[in-house]
Image: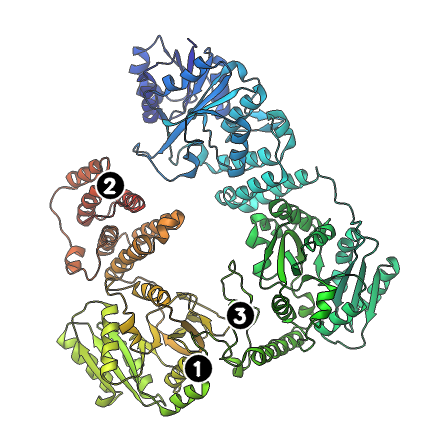
Amino acid sequence: MAKVSLLIPTYNRPLFLRRALESALNQTRLPDEILIFDDNPDSDENYRAVKDLVEAHKDRVFYRKNPENLGVVGNYRALLESASGELVKFLSDDDFLHPEAIERMVEPFEKDDSVGLVACGRAAVDLEGEVVNGLPAYLPLVDREGSVDVEWAVKLTLKELSNRVGEFSAYMFRKELLDFNPFNVAGVPFHANADWVLWMGLLLRSGSKLHYIPDRLVAYTVHPQQDQSSLKTVVEGVFELANLLLNREVWSFLGYSLSREEVARGFEKLLQREIRLVPVEEVIYPLYRLYRRYIEGFSKPKPSASSNGLSVVIVTYNNEETLRPLFETLLPSLSPSDEVIVVDNASTDSTPYLLKELASEDSRVKVVLNKENRGYAPAANQGADLASKPLLLFLNPDTALPPGWRSRLERAFKDRSVGALSVLGVGVYFTQHVGKFSAVDLFTGLKEVKEAELIETLDFHVSSLFGSGLEERKFLSGFFLATPKELFEELGGFDEELILGMDDLDYCLRVRERGFKPVLLKGLAVSHNWHHSFKKSPSESNRLNELSVNRFADKLVEKYGYGRVPPPEELWSSHLDRHLFYPFVPTKEKFRFMFRYGREPVDFPSAARTLFRGPKVAVVTVCYYSSGVIGKLAESLSRQSYGNFTWILIDHSESEEELEKLKNTVSRYLPPDKFCVIPRENRGFAAGVNSGASVSLSLGAEFAWFLNPDVELPSRKTLFEMLKNFLYTGADLLTCEIRDSRNPELLQYDGLKCSFIPFKDPFRRLKRVAFLTGSAFFCRPELLERVPMAEHYFLYFEDNRFKLDLEAAGYSLIYTPFVSIVHRGREVFPENPVQYYYFIRNEILFRFHETEEFIKNGEKGARFFLEVLGYYLSNVRDRKVLRALTLAVHDGVGRVSGRRRNLDELLRFKGRGSRRELKERFMSLRRFSKRLALKAGLEYLLTFPKDKEAFTLYLKDAHTVLREGSCGVK
């Protein structure tokens, strides 16, 4: 029977150490020796914690206090050197073993001499020893016990950058096979990831087998004091992982190799995940240098030897600073049969002289000097007319290209269905920005790196990630646009009416209509100095660009018809880019309603007749003790030029006194026939909205505008314009711009988001609603009979649900920036315990239960509970807020909905029982049922709300219950 040595390194963890040693001594197959090396020579605390166990098992347990501090690495090495067993297993002092761990792990060695290392599944536990589920690093390597291909395990680990085989505590190995120092490989020190190095190197160098047991035989404690938690160790770990991925000497020593794609995938993980844990500015340049060293191990791409021929067309205007860098990266990759045609648009700097010089140095360069600035599209067509090669590339003069770009471009056009092609870039529109596809754009901020080297690095990485694959797109940016010359001529080239801008949108649209594909070559990246020429004469450039935008709008209206033009997002956004399409925003007022956003095209004569007829509009406001804020809305309604409206105020105050105050306030501004105040039981905002819609219909209103009481209409024509925009957009529901009362130049709402931190919207045009706010929306009141607003929320998130329900029913929700209202600015939200309760409770209802958004995305779910903890910490002196948060979490998990009748009573809760008694009950129940623990935690925290530790555990339990689907708390 093989002798087993169990090695326990320890430092200042007496309680953990005792737990670890007890687990070692409770094994069904005891280790033959247990070595404990204490690395704190100045304290006996560790020894005192285990003295009785050491003395009771002195024939098996050896406890040594190091005469001096050896450090983590020194202590591990000392233990290894002292181990006398054939089989060795480490056990970190903060981990512990399943009772059958040693027996189960020894068995494969005794059955098969070729097994070199046995690893097992492990459970992550917290400080209380409870299992922490959902951590990807602790997923089993495989699901069934048996031999595992070592090379596959190594590559999976480096691809995911996750040690799926396990930490030191998770495996046992034959000591004789460890013929190297796992803490220093090829001159690279390894500390944080020495456990990776040991199992990889031992197995690969010896050629022995890896046996894996998926059962959790070891518990790994996750806590702030663990070695891997210190910033220094995390930074070391980042560079160690980088060396495992990029250092060929490390590969050679340990015995593996990686393809370019495997390295790129692993490096992506490093940049996306690991680097977030450290100060980026401290590590990014050293990581860049490591990556450069890896890249330099490859031979440089050779110039293209293609005979098909490429014509590069460049239009210049005052580009003296960027031409040399461009040509230094352009010409070396071209083949002898290629040509470069530069059309200069009457530059006033030294660009013409520089172009003549470049042409004299290389016969492939041809220069045309225009006497006047013809604009981009005419000049590009001029260059294309002179081109003699079958493939055209329109290239901006402020770009820089990577080595080997030419051959990759030509290969892409072997697919005859490709009509236009572009690439990734830096300094380009976000749909093609390198950063949208790869975290390697972190390198773009490095001032120490020259542009040519940087773009070579970025290009190498994306080409390794994506290869030569093509992704079909609806829109390609024109900074690098390749197309067959034959197709370009068939389509009539660029539209010369579009002097500066919109040419790429127009060309891609026509390419698609001809049956060809615009494609993105993601495996090629170039650098682009965004709008370099624009910056030379910004006012004139902006004027010409605006002229092109509006001319293009004219062209689209002529093509599709006014009010029938598909929205820009439909024309040019792919399924991968569902954001607002910013490049096309017509500025002339006549184009406001050119797009078709409604379900049916707008009949403008009919809409105009309806507007002229002046139909009745109901303004509906749901009030709750609103008499103090509603005056501004009342005054602004009294000034409206559109007179055929009735104001319906649904009063939820349930107070005769407040009802009279509300009537008196409104009557100061409006006559009795212009408004009605309807008191009703407070069943929540949505119930008030639904009731207001019913009243609107009963009063003969054809349209209804639902407005919060704390808004005002800034213009006399606001109501008229809202009705006009509704009719002219064909919307089923229309929202509008909401401006901040403290700074009316800034917005609180723009159709995409709602925020009490005001912001700007530079792209003012109609758009589909991405986020609906209930504070201001316009519709026909019968819409709410067909799709009523969900009343079970009572307050908050009913508008989120309303949007989903309307979209599911096929209705169109449109935002207009051409109508504004003003909303009271707020410093904070929520503002009081009641708001906290309904906001938190209903977010759990909506995002965990109904849409399951936070269940599907665990990171978002965890972040939500961190935000709740943040609310707790920022209101720690307000017992009512703390109770509101506690109750909100409990009720949200338990699907409690509607109005909380006894909310005020619970916020003043004074329970029975001592602090100790209630807390002990909560803590004990946590071990058996998180669901039952929530009820006990609620009672404790309502009685004693100021307990951060208990509230943190309470949130943790709530998240666990939600994730595991145990949502039946009552």
The amino acid sitting under disc 1 is: Tyr
Q: Is residue 85 above or below residue 691?
A: above
For numbered disc 2, what is the local secondary structure? helix
Which residue is tagged 3? 568
Residue 544: where, in percent of width, then height?
65, 77
Q: Nearer the viewer, residue 848 or 546?
A: 848
For numbered disc 3, what is the local secondary structure? helix
Q: Residues within 10 Å of mark 3 (few under 14, many from 20)?
A: some
Measure the alpha-carbon separation of dots 3 and 2.
50 Å
Which of the marked residues, 1 or 3, is nearer the chain's N terminus? 3
Which residue is tagged 1? 728
Left/right of residue 111 with respect to residue 248 in the rendered view:
left
The amino acid sitting under disc 3 is: Pro
Residue 125: where, in percent of width, then height?
34, 33
Which of the marked residues, 1 or 2, is nearer the chain's N terminus? 1
Which residue is tagged 2? 930
Residue 133: where, in percent of width, then height?
35, 38
Q: Which mark is residue 870?
A: none
Q: Is residue 854 above or below residue 386?
A: above
Q: Nearer the viewer, residue 54 or 249?
A: 249
Residue 908: where, in percent of width, then height?
16, 56
For the point 30% across and 18% down, the residue is 26
